Image (tube, helix red, strand yellow):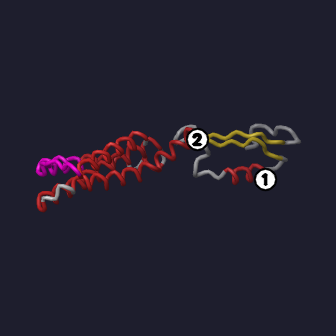
């Protein structure tokens, strides 16, 4: 996520500079290369799409492929526009648009990876509901030090101190 944000910052910087100093664009070559990139990245994104819902690493790779395919489509549109209108400002304008899309998609990835690094409870788990459930179990008088965190992008751990006046009921309790 951080790498995507930094790369996007560089694209924005270059795009702003190209507004004042436009460069010629080899539109035919750009269209051909971008069309190949759309096909390759589209197929890659499709292959990664199934795992992207449950695994943060897969989601990062999936978002990267989707962003690359979208970038390539926008590049084709800009190149065709430059061919027919001669408007060289389309090149940096599309770069800024693409940067905005990449930053928007990267934000969720950055947020989730930050939460994972902080050992935060996964968004899919309500710690209050877990606490209420554990407190409702027979023989549980109180619960202290409940901690729920993601061990990885696919596994979650929980620790807590259960106050049980009757003693430990054995392995069958939970």
Question: The residue tagged with tag 1: helix, strand or loop?
Answer: helix
Quadrant where the C terminus sits is top right
**Residue drawn at (50%, 42%) of the image:** 113
Residue 58 location in percent, x, y? 42, 43
Name the one closer to the observer, 134 or 149: 149
- Residue beneath the point at 11% across and 61% down: 84
| Residue located at (28% from left, 45% from top) | 14
How many marks can you see? 2
Q: Residue furthest bottom?
A: 85
Q: Is 17 a magenta residue?
A: no
Q: Residue furthest front?
A: 20
Taking the spot 35% from the left edge, 45% from the top edge, the residue there is 8
Q: Which mark is residue 12?
A: none
Left or right of 65, for residue 110: right
**Residue labelled with disc 1:** 136
Crowding at label 1, few (<14), some or many (≥20) Cα neighbours within 10 Å?
A: few
Camera-side residue of 27 and 23: 23
Q: Is residue 88 visible?
A: yes
**45 left or right, relative to 38:** right
Disc 2 designates what residue? 150
Asked whether, in this view, residue 167 is left or right of residue 157, the answer is right
Residue 89 in which image quadrant: bottom left
As drawn, the residue found furthest toward the right would be 165
Q: Nearer the viewer, residue 98 or 146?
A: 98
- Which span of residues is magenta-colored? 20-38
- As for residue 21 lying within the magenta part, the answer is yes
Q: Is residue 42 visible?
A: no
Relative to 117, 106 lies left or right: left
Q: CA distance from mark 1 to mark 2?
A: 24 Å
Relative to 87, is 42 above or below?
above
Q: Quadrant of residue 151?
A: top right
């Amino acid at each position: 996520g951080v790498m995507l944000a930094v790369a996007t910052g560089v694209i924005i910087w270059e795009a702003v500079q190209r507004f004042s100093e436009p460069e010629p664009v080899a539109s035919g070559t750009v269209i051909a290369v971008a069309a190949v990139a759309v096909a390759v990245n589209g197929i890659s994104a499709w292959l990664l799409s199934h795992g992207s819902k449950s695994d943060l690493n897969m989601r990062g790779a999936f978002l990267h492929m989707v962003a690359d395919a979208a970038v390539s489509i926008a590049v084709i549109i800009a190149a065709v526009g430059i061919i027919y209108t001669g408007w060289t400002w389309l090149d940096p304008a599309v770069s800024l648009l693409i940067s905005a899309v990449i930053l928007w998609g990267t934000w969720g990835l950055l947020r989730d990876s930050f939460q994972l690094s902080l050992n935060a409870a996964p968004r899919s788990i309500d710690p209050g509901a877990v606490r209420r459930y554990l407190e409702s179990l027979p023989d549980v008088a109180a619960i202290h030090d409940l901690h729920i965190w993601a061990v990885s992008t696919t596994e979650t751990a929980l620790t807590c101190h259960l106050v049980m006046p009757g003693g430990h009921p054995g392995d069958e309790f939970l």
